[in-house]
């Protein structure tokens, strides 16, 4: 008889694990709290405008290739490479920096502020490349059996990278570049990890290598939600059942094994194996009552920033915007010092803008734009009350109007604002943290919540807050790691 698995959550982690488990011969059922699949990789449509709800691009496209090929199927996605990768606008200046992967072209952007850019950048990226490849299989794509195993793997990473664990990313950039703008632009990746460049270890410069040299950034033809729809189509073909608006609120166990999970209506779901795609830390605290993950302990952990997102459908073409844009203020150090712990400064917001209608006309009615704005803000521990969400949205929209010279408010046909408390409540994101647990050295590898439960033999975890970490391709790797564990511990043959 076929073994069966229940997956709790239909985020990218849950969907890609389902694909891998069906390939191994498992019968899979997915239960999802929300009314659509995809988790954060979701979509929103209104009046002919379509928006990606969360992610708008990804790195390491080959991880999706690996997922599909190892599951014996053709890759159903058509990738589109981002070129330029993005555009950066600093407040108080009309100048825009276009960030190209081609170093000669990028050098032209900085020619008057960063002499010898190509040479400096090549030196910087050479170190980043070595760190990436020296840790890829030893640390990132590896299951660990405890801290000793992890520390042994770390010991296998060439020693020469050790200083980069203890130096900050900012000081590393400072050692290589002179201009403030180059340092700020290259350090933006640190915020994805849940820290600032001033307290992120320099090893994470490997992210600059992934964006500028290794594989770059990609989106998907038809919009990012195509990833979810194509996965769901294939899973249905394989007989996977989906149950929406079904939140697991209780876990039933006997003799060190889960025998059922129970939803909010009291329905129980039994299986041989259970995979949790809900946040791996807060699930352990809230549903399993583990003291190490109780609310006090969770609140002491480091979490990534919360998303404050705005979806605008606008009449007219906004010439001042490209497909991917960053709008930054002029007080970077002060911003970095305060953004995680205090509150967002509405006078000087830092935000990202994506306009997918620039390259995909189907996303908006003719002659119109779909504008997605993401302003990272402190999580709900630091700002629990979002009754002022519309005021902050107005400020950001006014700032963007001024900086693009286009009256956005006067041409708005669709407007939706999604503050951190809505992100929290929609997808069970702990304190509204957008990317899950942060990636300081104390919260990665064996120090991150494991993908196998500490005491329940058939309970596993996949997704952003377990290993290896957050971001779409990394979550795909997470599904590979957890499937390898399941295959080893609960073989189908
Ligand atoms: C605004 C925003 C922008 C982002 N941009 C990018 C980007 O450009 N590129 C990139 O690579 N990454 C980006 N990310 C990060 C990326 O979205 C995540 O790392 C990834 O989608 C996480 O997938 P997951 O499967 O771990 O979790 P999720 O997508 O959160 O899926 C978990 C699912 O489990 C469900 N669930 C939770 N608890 C329960 C329960 N008890 N019972 C039933 N169901 C439950 C949730 O509803 C959800 O559907 C962004 C994130 C946000 C929020």
Image (cartoon, rainbow, N blue to C red):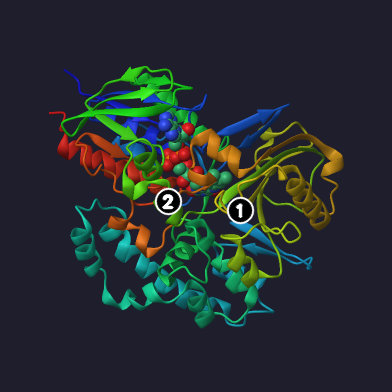
The mark nearer the N terminus, 1 or 2, is 2
Please tell me which residue is depicted at 65% across the width and 29% down the height of the picture.
45
Residue 133 higher or lower than 182, as above or below: above
Left or right of 41 in this view: 286: left
Residue 22 higher or lower than 296, as above or below: above
Please tell me which residue is depicted at 78% across the width and 51% down the height of the picture.
395
Quarter of image, res 130? bottom left
Q: Viewer-proximal residue, 409 or 179?
A: 409
According to the image, label 1 marks what residue?
A: 376
Residue 262 higher or lower than 479, as above or below: above
Outermost residue toward the left in this view:
493
According to the image, label 2 marks what residue?
A: 296
Q: CA distance from mark 1 to mark 2?
A: 24 Å
The spot of residue 183 in percent (x, y) is 58, 73
Please tell me which residue is depicted at 70% across the width and 58% down the height of the picture.
349
Instruction: Please indicate, yes or no, whether residue 155 appears anywhere in the rendered image.
Output: yes
Please tell me which residue is depicted at 60% across the width and 37% down the height of the picture.
422
Few, some or many residues within 10 Å of mark 1 (<14, 14–19, 20+): many
Residue 295 higher or lower than 91, as above or below: above
Dot in front, 1 or 2: 2
Instruction: Look at the numbered disc 2 and give the secondary structure of its residue.
Output: helix
Query: Is the CB atom of the residue marked by disc 1 within 8 angstroms of ligand 1's nearest atom?
Result: no
Left or right of 100 in this view: 486: left
Quadrant in the picture for the C terminus: top left
Left or right of 121 in this view: 369: right
Left or right of 401 in this view: 478: left
């Amino acid at each position: 008889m076929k073994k069966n698995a229940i997956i709790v959550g239909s985020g990218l982690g849950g969907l890609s694990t389902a694909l891998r488990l069906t390939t191994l011969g498992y019968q899979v059922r997915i239960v999802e709290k929300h009314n659509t699949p995809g988790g954060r990789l979701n979509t929103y449509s209104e009046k002919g405008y379509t928006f990606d709800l969360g992610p708008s691009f990804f790195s390491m496209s080959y991880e999706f290739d690996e997922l599909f090929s190892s599951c014996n199927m053709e890759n159903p996605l058509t990738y589109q490479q981002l070129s330029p990768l993005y555009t950066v606008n600093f407040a108080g200046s009309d100048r825009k920096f276009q960030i190209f992967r081609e170093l000669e072209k990028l050098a032209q952007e900085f020619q008057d502020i960063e002499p010898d850019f190509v040479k400096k950048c090549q030196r910087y990226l050479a170190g980043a490349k070595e760190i990436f490849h020296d840790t890829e299989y030893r640390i990132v794509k590896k299951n660990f059996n405890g801290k000793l195993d992890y520390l042994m793997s770390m010991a296998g990473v060439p020693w020469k990278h050790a200083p980069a664990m203890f130096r900050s990313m900012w000081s590393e950039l400072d050692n290589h570049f002179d201009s403030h703008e180059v340092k700020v632009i290259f350090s933006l990746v640190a915020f994805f990890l849940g820290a600032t460049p001033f307290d992120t270890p320099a090893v994470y410069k490997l992210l600059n290598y992934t964006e500028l040299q290794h594989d770059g950034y990609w989106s998907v033809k038809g919009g990012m939600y195509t990833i979810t729809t194509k996965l769901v189509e294939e899973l249905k073909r394989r007989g996977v059942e989906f149950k929406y608006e079904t939140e697991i609120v209780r876990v039933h166990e006997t003799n060190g094994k889960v025998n059922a999970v129970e939803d909010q209506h009291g329905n129980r779901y039994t299986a041989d194996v259970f995979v949790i795609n809900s946040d791996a830390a807060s699930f352990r605290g809230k549903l399993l009552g583990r003291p190490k993950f109780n609310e006090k302990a969770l609140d002491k952990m480091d979490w990534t920033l919360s998303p404050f997102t705005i979806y605008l459908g606008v009449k007219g073409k906004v010439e001042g915007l490209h497909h991917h844009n960053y709008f930054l203020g002029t007080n970077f150090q002060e911003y970095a010092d305060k953004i995680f712990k205090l509150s967002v400064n509405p006078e000087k917001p830092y935000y990202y803008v994506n306009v997918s209608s620039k390259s995909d006309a189907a996303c908006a009615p003719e002659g119109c734009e779909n504008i997605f704005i993401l302003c990272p803000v402190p999580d709900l521990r630091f700002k629990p009350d979002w009754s002022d969400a519309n005021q902050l949205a107005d400020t950001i929209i006014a700032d963007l109007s001024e900086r693009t010279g286009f009256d956005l408010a006067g041409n708005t046909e669709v407007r939706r604002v999604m503050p951190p408390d809505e992100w929290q409540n929609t997808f069970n994101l702990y304190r509204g943290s957008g990317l899950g647990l942060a990636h300081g050295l104390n919260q990665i590898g064996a120090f991150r919540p494991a993908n196998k439960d500490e005491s329940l033999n058939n309970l596993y975890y996949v997704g952003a807050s377990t290993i290896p970490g957050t971001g779409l391709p990394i979550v795909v790797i997470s599904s590979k790691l957890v499937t390898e564990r399941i295959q080893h511990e609960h073989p189908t043959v």
